[in-house]
Amino acid sequence: MSSKFFDYTLPELDSENFTTLLEHKNVKISRIISNTLKTEQTFLSDKDEWVIVLQGCAKLEMNGSVHKLTKGESLFIPANTEHKLLKTKKVVIWLAVYID
């Protein structure tokens, strides 16, 4: 099955949508679309997570450090590490890889 990565429905302002693109054995790959987030989002996963910004700019906090991610920048988030998406500028397109 094939799909076009950049064909998506834009979520409402200050919200996100998550689309699973592939699940195989201990790996899950998702596309995340964030639309002008101003409300802080807190996440905690029992899986390791690697994210890369494909479009836009976002600010995350993890372990007391703030990370500003722009197009092409990535971040590894170890399992059981609380992290906060503080805000995004306009629309951000992410690729997220979750590893069990």
Image (cartoon, rainbow, N blue to C red):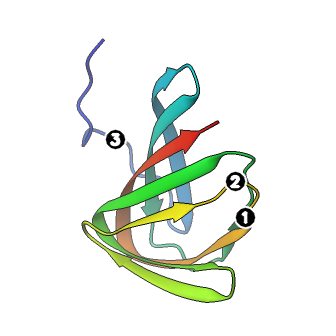
Measuring 50% from the left and 66% from the top, which residue is drawn there? 13
Label 3–label 1 contact, CB within 8 A = no
Sequence-earlier tag: 3 or 2: 3
Q: Residue 81: which disc?
A: 1
For disc 2, the marked residue is 79
Question: How far from the left and from the top, in percent, is residue 86?
Answer: 59, 80
Q: Is residue 29 above or below residue 32?
A: above
The local secondary structure at tag 2 comes to: loop
Question: How far from the left and from the top, in percent, is residue 53?
Answer: 34, 63
Label 3–label 2 contact, CB within 8 A = no
Q: Residue 8: which disc?
A: 3
Label 1–label 2 contact, CB within 8 A = yes
For label 1, count other residues whose C-alpha is less than 10 Å away and answer few (under 14), some (14-19) or many (20+). some
Mark 3 belongs to which amino acid? Tyr
Give the residue furthest to the top. 1
Q: Is residue 70 left or right of residue 63?
A: left
Measuring 46% from the left and 61% from the top, which residue is drawn there? 34
Mark 1 belongs to which amino acid? Thr
The local secondary structure at tag 1 comes to: loop
Q: Is residue 43 left or right of residue 89?
A: right
Foreground label between 3 and 2: 2
Dividing the picture into quadrants, the one containing residue 75 is bottom left
